[in-house]
Every structure is written in C-alpha cells, then in structure tokens.
Amino acid sequence: MMVFVITPLLVAGLIFYSAVIEPRWIQFTRYDIAIPNLPKSFDGFSILHLSDFHGRVGAFSFLKKMKITADIVAVTGDLFAWKTLPRSRIAHALDQLRAPEGVYFVSGNHDYRNGRLDVTPWNVGERLLDNRVIPLRRGEDTLWLAGIPDLVKGQPDWEKINAEIPQEAAAILLSHRPDAVLTPYASRFGLILSGHTHGGQVTVCGRFIPVRHTHVGKGYAWGKWIGPKGTVLITSRGLGSSELPIRFGARPQIVYIRLSLE
C-alpha cells in the first residue's frame, strides 16, 4: 500500500503555486449566447467581461498581448484590494480600456467605503452603470444594457431599471453578485453577467468548493447557469483575490461573450 507523505518541500511547492503561479495564470473563456428578441443587426455582438481585479493589473498585459477586443467592455465590480496596493495603477489601466460601443462598470462590495461608493482616483464618469439603462443602437435596432449596484453594499433600484426597458426588448444586466438571477426582475433579462465568487478562489480540483459566496444553484460558483425562467447567468471567476492573496483550483478568468439569434 502506497503512503502519501506531505513533505515540507511539497508544502512549499503548493504555497508557491497558489500564491505566485495560479493567480497569474489567466484563463480566456468564450461563450456563444442566444438571447430572446435579439435584433438581427446585433447577431455577433461581442462583450469582454472583466471582474474582481482587487488591484491586480496583470490582466491588462494579457489583453494587450492576446489582442482581445470586443464591441463593449463590461466591468462587474471590485476594483481595488489591500491598502498596500496602489489604487492609481488600476485606475490608470482602466482608463486605457477601449471599445467601439463603450466601457461600462457596476459596483462591487469592495468598491464601497463607509457606506458610499468610492473608486477614486479612477474618474468613472459615464462609465458607471449603477441603476442605469442605456440603449446600444445599430441603425433602427436597439439592445438595452442595464446595471445594478452591489446587492448588499449598494442601493439597487430594480423598479427604475425595469421601467426604462421596453417590454419584450432584448436586454442584458450587469450585476456584481450572481444572486441577481434569483430576484423577481431577473426574467426581464436574456443575459446577466456577474462576478464576486472568484470561482471559490480555493477549491479541490475546481470541484469541491468550500466557499461560494452565492445562493445560486447547488454547487454553482462560476460559469454558465440557466435561471428559473430561462435567463442565462454567466459568472466570472474574476482576476484578483481577496482576503487571502492566493488561488488554487480557480484560475483567474477573462470572459468573452458573443451574442447570437435564437
């Protein structure tokens, strides 16, 4: 019978991997998503989804190296992390993001200080989509993009954003927490993009996930999930780490989405 012995060298190797290797080993994931009532002119519309930087700027080098572009960039919260990491670096990197039809941001729980949204020194400006709805237009066709602030730290106004979207129109929601899919308003959106969970951040082979930070689905922590009324939820594992500066079995992730007709 073989006996597996945990040696100091093995422990050191695991610590090095989880603290140095995996946090920088970014995975690129693509989803092709069909959403209801998508206008024909938006067939092939692309979204670059970034989430949970927690001060890590390595993702921007990855984007530049891979030459990843999309029609819009969606950033779903948690920009900064430990006080020792300079906020100016991530703010500068965010300002370099470009997309033909806009860069949009919704707040996460780590974006609040003393009960108020604070993403300084980044001047988020019109990129802030908290409790806002904007039309993305191609000719006479419109795709509606909505955002909601963090469900716990923010003050989401579901009735406001629901009232601003025409009935039966194709719509997408940005929400830091995937639990938005559990609300009564979720069925109004064909697609919800979220983060927050970090895919568990520390898992056993990506399967046993002790901490999920969501009530969505049994065992769900990241990826594609279909809500009770057909809404597609995609949760990114994000790019940084919080609490403990490690990742294991939950690689940082950049998500690319291509929309298609049903």
Image (tube, helix red, strand yellow):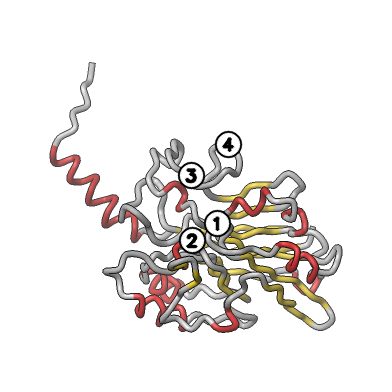
Q: Earlier in the sequence, mark 2 or mark 3?
A: 2
Q: Which residue is mark 1?
A: 152
Name the residue at 14% across, 41% down: 9
| Quadrant location of the C terminus in the rendered image | bottom right
Q: Earlier in the sequence, mark 4 or mark 2?
A: 2
Q: Which residue is mark 4?
A: 218
Q: Within 10 Å of the Cα at label 2, are there few (<14), some (14-19), or many (20+) other Cα atoms?
A: many
Q: CA distance from mark 2 to mark 3?
A: 15 Å
User: Is mark 1 in CB contact (under 8 Å) with mark 2?
Assistant: yes
Closest to the observer: 157 or 31?
157
In the picture as drawn, the residue positioned furthest to the top comes out as 1
- The amino acid at mark 4 is Lys
| Quadrant location of the N terminus in the rendered image | top left
SS assignment at label 1: loop
User: For this view, does 261 lie left or right of residue 51?
Assistant: right
Closest to the observer: 143 or 188?
188
Closest to the observer: 98 or 77?
77
SS assignment at label 3: loop
Q: Earlier in the sequence, mark 4 or mark 3?
A: 3
User: For this view, does 66 lie left or right of residue 245?
Assistant: right
- The amino acid at mark 1 is Val
User: Is mark 4 in CB contact (under 8 Å) with mark 3?
Assistant: no
Q: CA distance from mark 4 to mark 1?
A: 21 Å
Q: Which residue is mark 2?
A: 109
Q: Earlier in the sequence, mark 1 or mark 2?
A: 2
Q: CA distance from mark 1 to mark 2?
A: 7 Å
- The amino acid at mark 3 is Arg
On the image, the x and y values in percent for residue 189 come to 74, 59
Q: Which residue is mark 3?
A: 212
User: For this view, does 158 lie left or right of residue 235?
Assistant: right
